[in-house]
Image (cartoon, grey):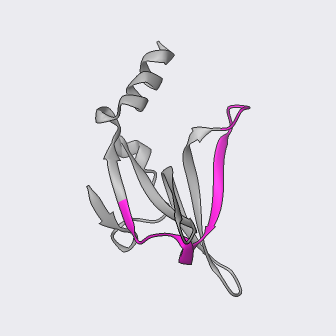
């Protein structure tokens, strides 16, 4: 399902709803990166609004990864994905058993 950031709830843990979010980061004018996230919040700095994102993947030490991205560099459309239909998530779940 595609939605906008304005329709999402900040500080809500979407992993509890068995979902994750895909944000589109405009890293360069010709380069857009996808960021998979379970949680996000908006941080208001002095000059810039930041989007704080908790990513779905862990770092090499198994800790949760957080990322700050300038809000102006994020596409306002966000994709909400159900984990139960995601092949990558199924592989991760099956690997735990």
The correct choice, above or below, for 73 with respect to 19 in the image is below
Give 76 or 53, whichever is nearer the viewer.
Answer: 76
Q: Quadrant of the N terminus?
A: bottom left
Q: Which residues are magenta?
A: 59-78
Residue projecting furthest to the top: 97
Residue 3 screen position, x and y as percent: 30, 65
- The residue under the point 46% across, 59% down is 23
Against 73, residue 81 (above or below) is above
Is residue 76 left or right of 46 when viewed as pictured? left
Q: Indicate left or right for 94 with 50 as reference.
A: left
Q: Residue furthest front?
A: 30
Q: Nearer the viewer, residue 26 or 39?
A: 26
**Front-most of 27 and 75?**
27
Q: Residue at x 43, y 44 (%)?
A: 15
- Confirm whether the magenta stretch covers residue 73: yes
> Can you tell which quarter of the image residue 8 is in?
bottom left
Q: Position of residue 86 (x, y in %)?
A: 34, 35
| Residue 76, quarter of picture | bottom left
Q: Is residue 60 magenta?
A: yes
């Amino acid at each position: 399902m595609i939605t906008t950031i304005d329709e999402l709830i900040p500080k809500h843990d979407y992993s509890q709803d068995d979902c994750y979010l895909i944000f589109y980061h405009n890293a360069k004018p010709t380069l857009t990166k996808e960021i998979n996230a379970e949680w996000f919040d908006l941080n208001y700095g002095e000059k810039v609004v930041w989007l704080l994102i908790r990513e779905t993947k862990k770092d090499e030490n198994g800790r949760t990864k957080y990322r700050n991205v300038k809000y102006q560099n994020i596409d306002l459309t966000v994709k909400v994905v159900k984990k139960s239909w995601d092949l990558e998530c199924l592989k991760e779940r099956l690997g735990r058993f």
